[in-house]
Amino acid sequence: MNEDHKGPERHRIKRRRRPHSTGPAKPPPGRSAAARRRRFRPPAPVLHRPPAAPPGQAAPRPHSLVFRRSRQLPRLQTHHLLRQVEPPPRSPQGVRRNPPEEHLLLERSAHRVRAPEQIRQRPEAVFVVGVLLLGGRQARFLHRIVEVHCFVLRNGFDSDIFVANALVTFYARCDEAGSARIVFDRMPERDIVSWNSMIAGYSQCGYYRECKELYREMVESGLRPNGVTVVSVLQACGQSQDLIFGMDVHKLVIDCQVQVDISLYNALIGCYAKCGSLDYARELFEEMDEKDEVTYGAIVSGYMVHGFVDKAMGIFQGMKCPGLSTWNAVISGLVQNNHHGEVLDLFREMLDSGTRPNTVTLSSILPTCSFFSTAIIDTYAKSGFINGAQQVFDRLKGSSLIVWTAIISAYAAHGDAITALGLFDNMQTRGIQPDPVTITAVLSACSHNGLVDVAWKIFNEMLPNYGIEPLVEHYACMVGVLSRAKRLSEAAEFIRMMPIQPSAKVWGALLNGASVSGDVELGKFACDHLFEIEPENTGNYVIMANLYSQAGRWEEADRVRGKMKNIGLKKIAGNSWIEMDGGLKSFIARDASSDKHEEIYEVLEGLLGPLREEGYVYKEEMDEESLHV
């Protein structure tokens, strides 16, 4: 980008400065101070504390009290009271208070208390409906506000410009730009607020071309834009990197002498910075007498986006007390420019300064924390949420080998060898060479899907292509691949030819293959080695005893179980888990610990018939059939 692109000299901003007050403001003539106080003093009953609620009943909401008594007040006082009883969105502790439902409750009260004919006769009711629409600004209340919109249409309030503006604003803030435009187009008359609401809605929803077109239509209609209009359009120009349009808007600001405040300055800096005119953005930045978090964030983000990390860090280090948005801009910029080594140090510095990170901060540093990212991918995969694991991986641009291995292992565990192998090839295309753990994950994927030829190819290429000497884990994977494909003799020969001593994993893979194929002699051969290597592993005894039982060799099965008992080993019962009543319940075979175990087994018996009708065969029945074949 061209850092030296400057705006024209005639576009230089000259702010209007308000004259400083030289003394207390003089009251307007013709009205005493007492009269002025009475002018805005509401009737006494409105300010009285409401009576205590009866036991078991909730205290009346402030908005509802104001509305029920608003028939005693003129419109202006009703407006001020509604605004005063609304506290800040969040308390200092971060807990949200008085959610938007209070505005909706007020609307429903309006619908119950007065008939439509009475509402039409009261202009302040229209005003109250507008306040309600402006109060609900969250997308989760969209369906309720649609009801309010229907109420407005039924009662003819849509011709009121204040109500229509409120509808446009609300729909836009809920990312419903199409609905907002419909309301806007149907307005019989529009003011500057109408145009600003629609233009801002397009800008916020990402419809930058429509935003600029509507702005041009507004100017051509002869309506003069104000600072609010210009801020929205400049944001759209910055996001779409339309420098020429942004400069035209800047020229209009100067020609029309639009009052320039800090928000407009920030929008100009953001527009020029995002479009690559960094020198001019820096000049505007230096001109400002007062700067806020948005100002620093705009210039820092501009430098970071275009790769000027040193200049961005210079501005950041010159700040006395950076806010959360500036910390996020710097951390995100360092990640985008692959300065991963500095990110964690900066994050620690942020914590030491007392600034609490938010989700934006954590998602920005995620690519730098390979161990953290890997843990998330692994957790999602083990929980069955493979799409979530993929989403985390997709956000990690320029992922390390550890992260690639984690996502390959995730798909291998889910039996999706095609995706796992595709990721393996994609990783190498990006210049990342596998390590022994990656090869193990790929061979495991081949094992789950019976891809013997692919597994052989990867195994034989380990040393010549990747410089990796096969480890015992790789040999175990190959034995598993051959055993699952029922190529047991080839697996046994592969073990015999191994240049290293076979481990329990290797013999265990052969035993599992023999168990699946019903090969008693090969299973006994593998078990003899396993009994020597890990004599206290109960799983080997259980598999061998079951293998003897399937072949009808009951004496050998009893001998294995007796050997297991003499050593003092006991088979660990398999558990089934179910979430119930907010907790996890554990069940084992023939479990009678529950007070309702008889009812449980009755229900289970009732399910056996339908399962047989669906074609399911139980292992005991399958074993009995195999004995008669």
Image (tube, rainbow, N blue to C red):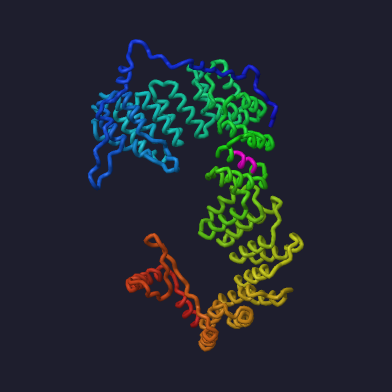
Residue stretch in magenta:
329-334
Q: In this view, does 485 lie above or below 255?
A: below
**Place of residue 203 in the rendered image (x, y in percent of width and height, measured from the top left):** 51, 31
| Residue at image location 46% in from the left, 70% down from the top | 575
Magenta-drawn stretch contains 70: no
Between 159 and 225, the one nearer to me in the picture: 225
| Residue at image location 65% in from the left, 18% down from the top | 9
Which image quarter holds the N terminus? top right
| Residue at image location 36% in from the left, 36% down from the top | 146
**Place of residue 460 in the rendered image (x, y in percent of width and height, measured from the top left):** 72, 65
Between 536 and 203, the one nearer to me in the picture: 536
- The image quadrant that residue 582 belongs to is bottom left
The overriding secondary structure of the stretch rendered in magenta is: helix
**Place of residue 263 in the rendered image (x, y in percent of width and height, measured from the top left):** 53, 27
Q: In this view, does 241 lie above or below 9?
A: below
Side of 431 relative to 320 (left or right): right
**Place of residue 247 in the rendered image (x, y in percent of width and height, measured from the top left):** 61, 23
| Residue at image location 25% in from the left, 26% down from the top | 72
